[in-house]
Image (tube, rainbow, N blue to C red):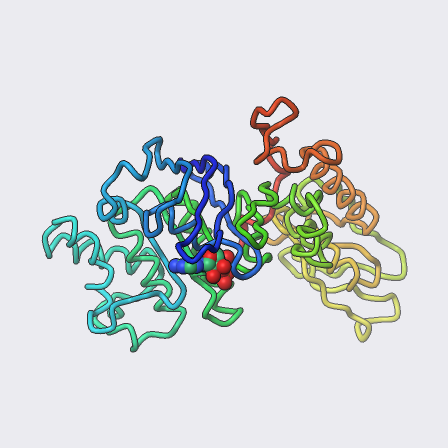
Amino acid sequence: MIQFDTVHKRFPNGTTAVDDLTLEMPEGGVTVLVGSSGCGKTTTLRMINRMVDPTSGTIRVGGKDVLEQDAAELRRSIGYVIQQSGLFPHRTVLDNIATVPLLLGWGRKKARARAAELLDTVGLAADAGKRYPHQLSGGQQQRVGVARALAADPPVLLMDEPFGAVDPVVRTQLQDELLRLQRELNKTIVFVTHDIDEAVRLGDRIAVFRTGGHLVQCASPAELLARPADDFVADFLGAERGLKLLSLTTLAEVPQAPAPEGGAWTLRLDSAGAPVAWRHKDGAATDVPVRPLRDTDSLLAALNESLSAPTGLVARVDETGSLTGVTSREDIHDRAGAAHERGRAVCGPVGTARATQDGGPDGEPTETTPAPATAKRTT
Ligand SMILES: Nc1ncnc2c1ncn2[C@@H]1O[C@H](COP(=O)(O)OP(=O)(O)OP(=O)(O)O)[C@@H](O)[C@H]1O
């Protein structure tokens, strides 16, 4: 959907913001641009809708060179969400959302009806539409910003640190909402963030930039975590890289066995068959509460639960909450090792990890295998 071909951006003051960027952002996927401050993420994003024009190279959206399109028209056809929402303070929420449809000549009634529909889509009550932006919380304003970007149903959405100004709890809620919306709308999203956890959670592909506008690596979250291209990427991913990889892999394929009987600890169930606690043979006073897990939960959650359980066993349940079996810490470890190996396998031997952007040994772009089943789409 979006292709950068040897794109270079040098500002008139001599700063090179983007250096020789070749990158594809697939249709219907979320491509996250990450990297330290000043590494060219925003400039890259803004070249897509011509808020900044490249010095050289070509950018195509849907196969068409952006420089051959009218800049204002292009901008109206691409959704754009920024930090602090960027809403017009003197317009009501409904009128803010209706901005692009009105510019496109939809007529007031149709534009407002669409805006009202979008309020619901982004999880806001209808009465929020009559308020002004300052009468909403930061998180609600960001939802309005997303609704405004979606108003004309653009195929492409550019999001520049959209959740950077809200607290961690609201940020997680907004990420959940975006994942839910994306499952329904299937937009091509380019998302800029400083936060690697946000990138891992939201991205189908993550592009890591280094100061000077260099793309260092572009890969799926699992590949990136299992096989960072160099020390810079590894440092950026952080010391908990292995745990982050576990957060991407589900429990689904980990074996389970019947709950143990007759040992020191027994798993207590309620009348509906849902696990409640581990009870020692000495009696109820020793009960240790259980947090049962489903197939869609992550290996990280499973490891955490197994470390908290006196038996090291994780209680597994079906969609109704009934016990299906237990899983041992050893089986979780085995699966964790396999997840790491799979992440390595898709990247090939040392030195080829940059293949997705640099091309393979023949200079041809190299395809990457789909990442293992992941937990990120479950909220
Ligand atoms: N209009 C401009 N004129 C001159 N230099 C600019 C301009 N806009 C950006 N730059 C410079 O280009 C480089 C890349 O900036 P950019 O905003 O793209 O980085 P970023 O990775 O998005 O940073 P941040 O994460 O801090 O927002 C920086 O050195 C910045 O100072």
Q: Nearer the viewer, residue 373 or 270?
A: 373
Looking at the image, residue 45 sits to the left or right of residue 289; the answer is left
Q: Residue drawn 59% across and 28% down?
A: 366
Residue 63: horizontal and vertical position, in percent?
35, 31
Left or right relative to 246: residue 79: left
Quadrant in which the N terminus appears? top left
Q: Is residue 135 above or below residue 14?
A: below
Q: How far across and down, in percent of the image, does residue 152 sit? A: 24, 48
Say above or below: 27 vs 174.
above
Q: Residue at x 30, y 39 (%)?
A: 67
- Nearer-the-camera pick, 331 or 267: 331
Q: Is residue 203 above or below residue 253?
A: below
Residue 37: x and y, percent?
54, 61
Query: Most extreme residue toward the bottom, as rendered?
Result: 135
Where residue 190 appears, as percent x and y from the top left, is 44, 48
Left or right: residue 164 versus residue 68 is: right
Residue 301 in view of the camera: no
**Near-viewer residue (161 or 56):** 56
| The quarter of the displayed image where residue 335 is located | top right
- Give the number of callouts: 0
Q: Residue at x 25, y 65 (%)?
A: 126
Is 309 left or right of 109, judged from the image as shown? Answer: right
- Is residue 20 something that shows in the picture? yes
